[in-house]
Image (spheres, helix red, strand yellow):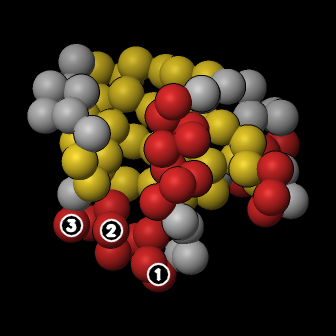
Amino acid sequence: MKLSIHAKDVMGNRNIPEKWVYCVLNDPSLIIEIKEDEVHYYGMIETYDNRCLKVVVNPLKALVVTTYFDRKMQKKGCK
């Protein structure tokens, strides 16, 4: 799966290592299909205070669109 330019930019700005993104993609705690070209992956990052990382993917292009820590899902236990 490739990273979009936007995803690379936000990862740099938000100090999100690439390995965290791929950890969530490889072992998500939750996957939500929004539509055919948008899927949200969620996973806890234990080494970062168990915060919930959201990775938005376009599966048709095998492309990570963006990623960020989701506070709403954090409150729900990232589930």
Say what amino acid the circle numbered 1 marks.
Asn
Q: Quadrant of residue 29?
A: top right
Name the residue beneath numbered marker 3: 5
Q: Is residue 20 above or below residue 11?
A: above
Which of the 4 image quadrants contains residue 66?
Answer: bottom left
What residue is shown with label 2?
8
Query: What amino acid type is highlighted by mark number 3?
Result: Ile
Mark 2 neighbour class, 10 Å CA radius: few under 14, some 14 to 19, many 20 or more? some
Residue 59 screen position, x and y as percent: 24, 27
Give how far across and how far down residue 57 sits, in percent.
Answer: 33, 37
The residue that appears at 59% across and 27% down in the rendered structure is 27
Query: Is 67 drawn above or below residue 73 in the view shown?
Result: below
Q: What residue is shown with label 1?
A: 13
In the visual, does 16 lie left or right of 49? left
Q: Is residue 9 above or below residue 18?
A: below
At label 2, which amino acid type do we have?
Answer: Lys
| Quadrant showing the C terminus | top right
- The residues bearing labels 3 and 1 have C-alpha atoms spaced at a distance of 12 Å
